[in-house]
Image (cartoon, rainbow, N blue to C red):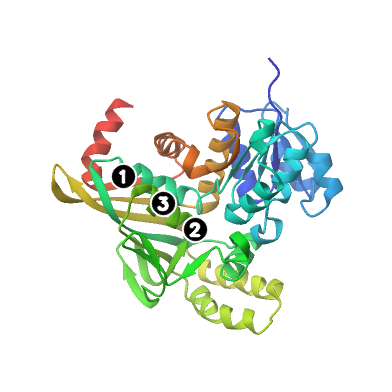
């Protein structure tokens, strides 16, 4: 049986390179590695002990180059951005070539574009969006946690962030997510909003510029933000209350983030602001070890009594977490475990499989607490 051709776009980037390793660990070989720098792609290809990977020049902003890359692929894993600018560009090119697509970002804007062009399910094709750390793992982990020891859940508090390098894609998406790119032209989410009574409530929370949290060392900034993914999560779990905080430990990044909304409104060039954000992240990281944390606490009932279940994930890099989720989504599509059409990773990936993979691969340290601690020990025994 002929092996499927898996194209990894942005294969030499922080996420792409890690995704290639994850795909190889899942048994996928003969990958097509795409990017704009031949020497960097060759370096990634040389990591394949069998030497079966191929390198193809590809630029997501150049239709001809993108077409040449997607032609002949069975599935494309998109690891490039920025999301707000590309939207469904890569997924559309993959579909035009008769291939499936997994996008580590994408989110609502890409879904909107794809469905407006016609549901790919009609052609038996699948597009999986938001197959990364955030969005993606940020919804998969609470879903996993909800099945660990609680009979029902009513509230979730989440804290996600860390200290690591900032890629150009992350810098642009971070800045512009509040002003561009959501469904029907709306933002990706709403700052300071939360879920109350099962519905979004604007200005329900406040930013804490100098705070402490048990899962993060030192002083941090806590910025409330309710994304479209988080709202969907609240609906799926039937939450009455959801508080979501993006955590920024580095003082240089925290200071710049306070200025960004005003600078963007004043018309400052996004490219220059992105460079400043990348530099600020580098300054914060100087002499320190990078880390990324996702901390979740669910409230509900167990055996008819009030109970809580918590989970803290610690990793050296959010980029590797994104790569792992993206690779698992590719694997699931190729195994025909994902229905055709436009899907979000959190809706189609099995949370147990994702958690098991992260543990097996050593990509993260996951520590359940409360009701989840005992249930997780039983589950580990079963595995």
In the image, 33: left or right of 346? right
Measured Cα–Cα span from mark 3 to mark 1: 11 Å
Residue 179, above or below 198: below
Circle 3 sits on which residue?
233
- Residue at 48% x, 54% y: name it: 229
Left or right: 241 as drawn, with respect to 271: left
Q: Which residue is the site of mark 1?
A: 146
Please give the residue where the numbered disc 2 appears in the rendered image.
228
Query: Residue at point 65% right, 57% down?
Result: 83
> In the rendered image, which quarter contains the N terminus?
top right
Along the line of sight, the residue nearer the viewer: 369 or 98: 98
The front one of 167 and 107 is 107
Which secondary structure, mark 1? helix
Q: Is label 3 in contact with label 2 (beta carbons under 8 Å)? A: no
Disc 3 or 1, which lies upstream in sequence?
1
| Rendered residue at 45%/38% (across/down) | 354
């Amino acid at each position: 049986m002929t092996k499927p051709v898996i194209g990894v776009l942005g294969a030499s980037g922080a996420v792409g390179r890690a995704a290639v390793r994850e795909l190889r660990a899942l048994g996928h070989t003969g990958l097509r590695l795409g990017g704009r720098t031949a020497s960097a792609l060759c370096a990634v290809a040389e990591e394949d002990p069998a030497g079966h990977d191929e390198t193809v020049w590809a630029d997501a902003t150049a239709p001809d180059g993108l077409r040449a890359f997607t032609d002949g692929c069975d599935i494309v894993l998109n690891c490039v951005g920025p999301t707000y600018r590309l939207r469904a560009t890569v997924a559309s090119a993959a579909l035009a070539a008769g291939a499936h697509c997994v996008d580590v970002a994408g989110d609502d804007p890409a879904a909107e574009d794809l469905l407006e062009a016609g549901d790919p399910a009609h052609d038996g094709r699948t597009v999986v969006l938001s197959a990364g750390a955030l969005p993606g793992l940020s919804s998969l982990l609470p879903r996993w946690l909800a099945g660990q020891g609680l009979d029902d859940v009513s509230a979730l508090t989440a804290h996600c962030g860390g200290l690591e390098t900032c890629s150009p894609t992350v810098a642009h998406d971070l800045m512009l997510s509040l002003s561009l790119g959501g469904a029907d032209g709306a933002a990706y989410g709403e700052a300071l909003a939360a879920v109350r009574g099962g519905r979004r409530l604007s200005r329900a929370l406040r930013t804490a510029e100098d705070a402490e949290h048990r899962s993060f060392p030192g002083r941090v900034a806590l910025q409330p933000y309710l994304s479209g993914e988080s709202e969907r999560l609240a609906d799926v779990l039937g939450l009455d209350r959801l508080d979501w905080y993006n955590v920024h430990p580095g003082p240089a990044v925290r200071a710049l983030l306070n200025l960004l909304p005003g600078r963007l409104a004043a018309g400052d060039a996004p490219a220059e602001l992105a460079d400043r954000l990348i530099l600020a992240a580098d300054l914060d990281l100087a002499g320190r070890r990078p880390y990324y944390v996702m901390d979740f606490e669910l409230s509900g009932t167990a055996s008819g009594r009030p109970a809580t279940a918590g989970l803290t994930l610690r990793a050296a890099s959010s980029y590797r977490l994104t790569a792992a989720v993206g690779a698992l989504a590719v694997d699931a599509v190729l195994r025909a475990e994902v229905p055709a059409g436009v899907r979000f990773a959190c809706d189609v990936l099995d949370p147990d499989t994702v958690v098991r993979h992260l543990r097996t691969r050593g990509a993260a340290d996951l520590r359940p607490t409360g009701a989840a601690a005992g249930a997780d020990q039983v589950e580990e025994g079963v595995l």
